[in-house]
């Protein structure tokens, strides 16, 4: 039941947003101040690692990454799908719709567009990341595969 799922997901999303803003605030504070910067950086990185262990990806944005955005996004998608063997458990391939939904759910409010997903997937093979996009001609279904 999607309504029950959304009721359960809303509080978790709020917690993730709180931690994401905390991470950003701590990184900015560490960059502008040398006092206890190392301790703040370590605490922030521990928080980032904890969120990534839960499958929450970092808040990569095109504004921050510039021309490297789609390459970094491709790497992040591969890392996300390899975390807990998501792609392997799905039989070695997933539809792009499933990848798009799962990845954006993990990103919280910093979602990617379908075009960004397609651009990142097109770069995976060139970057040698071990995954690629495949199109089934008869049905038109697009998948990502090992």
Image: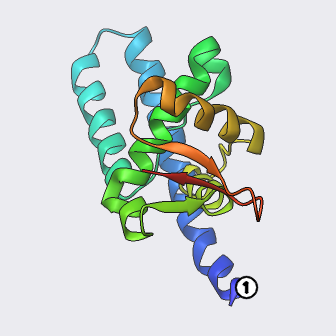
Q: Residues within 10 Å of mark 1 (few under 14, many from 20)?
A: few
Identity of the residue drawn at 58% across and 18% down:
65
Q: Which quadrant of the view contains residue 143?
A: bottom right
Which type of secondary structure does the marked residue at label 1 adopt? helix
Identity of the residue drawn at 66% across and 87% down:
4
Q: Is residue 64 left or right of residue 53?
A: right
Q: Residue furthest front?
A: 138
Residue 85 lies, in percent from the top left, at: 33, 60
Residue 98 lies, in percent from the top left, at: 62, 63
Residue 60 lies, in percent from the top left, at: 55, 32
Where's the N terminus, which quadrant? bottom right
In the foreground, 62 or 93: 93
Residue 36 visible at all: no
Find disc 1 in the rendering and name its residue: 3
Q: Residue furthest bottom?
A: 1
- Using the image, determine if residue 128 lies above or below residue 49: above
In the foreground, 67 or 25: 67
Residue 84 lies, in percent from the top left, at: 32, 61
Q: Is residue 97 left or right of residue 27?
A: right
Identity of the residue drawn at 41% across and 12% down:
31
Q: How many marks?
A: 1
Identity of the residue drawn at 75% across and 45% down:
114
Colouring convention used in this rendered image of the protein: rainbow
- Using the image, determine if residue 120 lies above or below residue 139: above
In the foreground, 5 or 32: 5
Residue 137 visible at all: yes
């Amino acid at each position: 039941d999607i309504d029950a799922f959304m009721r359960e997901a809303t509080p978790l999303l709020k917690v993730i947003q709180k931690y994401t803003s905390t991470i950003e605030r701590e990184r900015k504070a560490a960059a502008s101040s040398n006092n206890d910067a190392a301790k703040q950086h370590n605490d922030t990185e521990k928080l980032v690692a904890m969120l990534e262990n839960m499958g929450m990806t970092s808040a990569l944005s095109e504004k921050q990454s510039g021309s490297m955005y789609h390459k970094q996004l491709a790497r992040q998608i591969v890392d996300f799908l390899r975390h807990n063997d998501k792609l392997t458990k799905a039989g070695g391939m997933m539809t792009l719709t499933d990848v798009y939904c799962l990845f954006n759910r993990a990103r919280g409010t910093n979602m990617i567009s379908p075009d960004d997903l397609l651009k990142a997937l097109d770069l995976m093979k060139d970057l040698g990341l071990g995954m690629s996009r495949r199109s089934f001609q008869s049905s038109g279904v697009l998948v990502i595969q090992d």
